[in-house]
Amino acid sequence: MRDALMKKLAILAESAKYDASCASSGVGRSNARGGIGNAARLGVCHSFTADGRCISLLKVLYSNHCRYDCAYCVNRRSNDLPRTAFTVEELTELTLEFYRRNYIEGLFLSSGVLVSPDHTMERLVRVVKNLRVTHGFNGYIHLKSIPGAARELVYAAGLYADRLSVNIEIPSETNLRRLAPEKNYESVYAPMRYIHERLRENREERGKFRSAPVFAPAGQSTQVIVGASDERDRDILRLSSLLYKGPGLKRVFYSAFVPVNGHDSRLPALQSAPLRRENRLYQADWLMRLYHFEAAELLDEAAPDLDMDVDPKLAWALRHPEFFPVDLNTDDYLRLLRVPGIGLISARRIVLARRHGRLEAGQLGKLGVAVNRAAHFILPRQHKGSAPFLTIREAGPERVRRAILSGQSAMRGEYQLSLPIKG
Amino acid sequence: MRVFYYDASFEGLLSAVFDAYTRREFPDALLSPADASPLLRTAAHTVKTSEEKSDRVWRALKKKLSGEALEELRLAWLSEEKESDALIFRYICKVFDSLRAETDLADAHVFAVHRLAKRVVCEKNRLTGFARFQKTRQGVYFAAIAPRHNVLPLLLGHFADRFADQDWIVYDTQRFYGVLRSRGAFTQVCLSLERAEALRSQGGRLEASLLEEGEALFQALWRTYFTAAAIIERENPRQQRRCMPARYWPYLTELQKEGAVVTRDCKVVGALPQTPQGD
């Protein structure tokens, strides 16, 4: 029994790990009387695997049997690998026992499509209902909504889960149809829209009646695979920004494509997973969600892909020298946020600290500003030793870029050194 | 050099502030009686800790500081860093002497307290995730931790809410004390020195004889899951260490080798979880 369960867990965790989401945040909930568990608003990371990703939730598939044959997926029908499935009881026990030992924050449950979408979705709902209702489990639950499942099942899932997600996987419909012949965008967007409507409706109801049932309080998220098809970064960011604005997604996750299935002419041959690109996309995503940047500002027709050498905020600043310098003593919070080297926290600190008197050049490091980076974009003028930093307006974007990339800084002194000697 | 001696408690520190203002003299160094006295001691005063004094100082602080800033003071105290008492002392003086000190982050002392508090919160947040419980025969869940700062008091509320239906102990092997939560009440727990040392050398693991039958299975399952969840193509040990510093590793079930703990020849004081010696 012991070995069988061990094997099952290994297989079903292996086949679930390519899903990038691990977040357990977005909902704060105290334990209920007689129950077990609560949810921390900011989420809790319980461990970090050898790839440096956090383990917050027990992320497994209910089953890795699948009737679909998607080119990018490790669990596709045509792959010859051991197939298995949990029972509802096994999964419930595993979740609770792990939770009681503080290994995990909750459960992230997804599944291959077993017999039909409804059949699969019904099993998933049974697991979460069992946890919530029978065992009084108040920890975090993230449930994958199986594309094509009946609305009643999706609704039931939302009553027990904190977050629902439907993965887009491939950022354009043409490519999705090419790589996953049995899927189309309608099968993804229909449940996404449905969840969005229920979320909105639920918010209104809860405004009127406090006792109304809560529907997926941590909202919905999705994932796109980066590098399995030929979309540019501009297309991906445009898609994300539409998803944040339209169906009001909480998060879009980006997953660098790992070629798991050997050679396939429909997929690019990659030396390694495009991790750098994934990272830049996440940075751009944060700029859109928290720093008030628009997708169109970050990338346009002239620059369809993110700069791999510098982060998207610095790249934007280098393209817009006319925006700078930003005066830390007088400019507003939103302008501060646009300075490379100043983050959400340091911007807030600057706003607090400057009430007590003028901020002087030497104080910024203490406030958490990355001074060598920010120095080219701000006033008061910064100094390194006695040499003053040049602002981007004085040094020009090209020089600032080179300076930051080489770990140096553009200083006033350099001009004098490079002057040709007369005579 | 003017020296204040105090009993190294938080109330003592607040009483020292009270004495400084009533005597109108401010110390250059705060020492506990156990410390060696400095060479150039010109004047010394021994602070008598009293609830009345510390209460008055705390009430005055409450008037001048936000709840958030008061909490930061408490956190900075729990950091147990060297010189943190002197820092808190100066910070409190600054609060009394100026109009609104707490947001003046460009000030060295204000910022230092802020940063110290942040480090403590950071470790507390880490341990809410990294503490690993083992289920004992008596049904009590036991976790040993070895934090740099004294964060155990900060963890209690979180675990009390989360594990409301189970009895548990969190034990700090660095500071030799633990807390038992049972039937809705907290009790302080002391272990014998031998046991505490044994726990420390075994990464907080209890001997198999103390553990419930299913415990080994779930630990093994967790190790299996931990290994299976990593994507080898993305291996990134630097990132792993950055997020989960190596000093926590000995206490993490998933990174411990499978197999029972060697029972050392140590005397068990009572059956561990049954008879916590409260104080």
Image (tube, coloured by chain):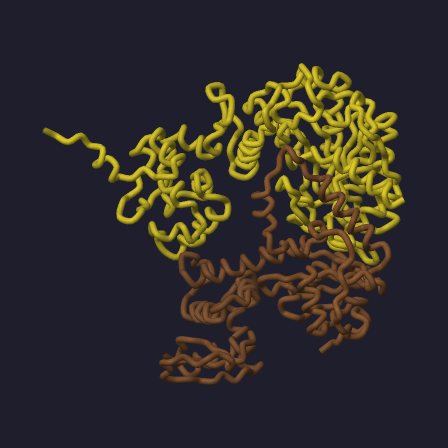
Chain colours: A yellow, B brown
Decide if residue B200 is on the left or right side of residue A295: right
Q: Is residue B20 above or below residue A268?
A: below
Decide if residue A259 is on the left or right side of residue A328: right
Residue at 50% of width from left, 48% of height from top?
Answer: A345
Quarter-of-image position of residue A402: top left
- Residue B53 pos. (x, y %): 53, 81
Report the front residue among A183 and A422.
A422
Residue at 53% of width from left, 60% of height from top?
Answer: B117
Residue A129 appearing in the image = no
Quadrant that contains the N terminus of chain A: top right
Report the front residue among B222 and A186.
B222
Quarter-of-image position of residue A57: top right
The image shows a total of numbered marks equal to 0
Quadrant that contains the C terminus of chain A: top left
Q: Is residue A80 above or below residue A96?
A: above
Report the front residue among B134 and B206.
B206
- Residue B264 pos. (x, y %): 74, 67
- The residue positioned farthest toward the left in the image shown: A423
Q: Is residue B75 above or below residue A178?
A: below
Residue at 81% of width from left, 60% of height from top?
Answer: B208
- Residue A241 pos. (x, y %): 59, 29
- Residue B225 pos. (x, y %): 75, 43
Residue A402 appearing in the image = yes
Quarter-of-image position of residue A285: top right
Decide if residue A338 is on the left or right side of residue B206: left
